[in-house]
Amino acid sequence: MAIADSIVVLTGAGISAESGIATFRGPGGLWEGHRVEDVCTPEALARDPLLVHRFYDARRAALAGVEPNAAHRALARLDAEWPGELLIVTQNVDDLHERAGARRLLHMHGELLSALCASCGARRAWRDDLPPGTACVDCGAPALRPDIVFFGEMPYDMDRIDAALARADIFVSIGTSGAVYPAAGFVQTARWHGAQTLEINLEPSGGSHLFDESRMGAAGKLVPAWVDDMLASISP
Ligand code: OAD
């Protein structure tokens, strides 16, 4: 393996499951007691802003009670030590990758610890509750909302992600069901550009057949092992 190999890692809710954050499509298909469509669409926000804001307030507050796990820490180690290009693209809105120390990281579906102004588009770090009608610090409009990419909205940083996928030698998908596009299509893009593709997930996902290799099991065990192998491959 060449030292300059370029890696793209995609993570989903499964990587934070062992930290105690519920996945989206777990038993019963509910996310913390709600259907995803009731709290994660522009229509839901327009229909019942209080419900949606409170839902994300609760998720934001819950971050204080969780810690990064071995999988987050392993990816942070890869970030620190991998000499080639690396981009960790997470669909997760928690901050566990950065708390573990990852820096080469994008949150394509937004962040709990950020507020978005629906009027001027400004994004601001946000740690407290966010009641509907909160004024934007930048433009003054009472239009701050959770900085979450809802269904039907464009994920963040797609240009950067597409460029990284086009250059990737290795694409790894960790803890995602492959149910939500465009992230579910990254494996095909990466393959088309010639990357080796690996899936690490508790169970076969909808797109397992698209990967060159699938490793089934807990991310907290399999990700550190994969990172160890990657870093061993470049040690002199
Ligand atoms: P899902 O809940 O759809 O899938 C989580 C995947 O993680 C499942 O395939 C599980 O089998 C797997 N899993 C669970 N525990 C695991 C563990 N310990 N180790 C490894 N894998 C494990 O979550 P996502 O695929 O992330 O969008 O969902 C994608 C998007 O759908 C989310 O980003 C969210 C949601 O609607 C937005 O909020 C915009």
Image (tube, rainbow, N blue to C red):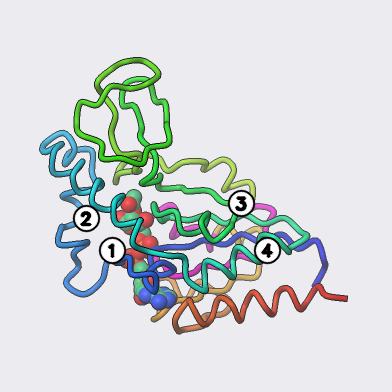
Mark 1, ligand 1, within 8 Å: the answer is yes
Q: Report the number of discs.
A: 4
Identified at 33% across, 70% down, the residue is 20
Q: Amino acid at mark 3?
A: Arg
Q: Amino acid at mark 4?
A: Gly
Q: Residues within 10 Å of mark 1 (few under 14, many from 20)?
A: some
Asked if residue 225 is positioned above or below residue 78 in the image, the reply reads below
> Of callouts 2 and 1, which one flags the residue occurring earlier in the amino acid sequence?
1
From which residue to which does the magenta span run? 166-188
Is there a contact, CB below 8 Å, between mark 2 and mark 1? yes
Asked if residue 148 is positioned above or below residue 27 in the image, the reply reads above
> Of callouts 2 and 3, which one flags the residue occurring earlier in the amino acid sequence?
2
> Label 2 belongs to which residue?
36
Q: Which mark is residue 24?
A: 1
Q: Amino acid at mark 2?
A: Val
> Label 3 belongs to which residue?
103
Viewer-nearest of discs 2 and 4:
2
Distance of label 2 from label 4 (alpha carbons): 34 Å
Viewer-nearest of discs 4 and 1:
1
> Of callouts 3 and 4, which one flags the residue occurring earlier in the amino acid sequence?
3
- SS type, badge 1: loop
> Of callouts 4 and 1, which one flags the residue occurring earlier in the amino acid sequence?
1
Distance of label 2 from label 1 (alpha carbons): 7 Å
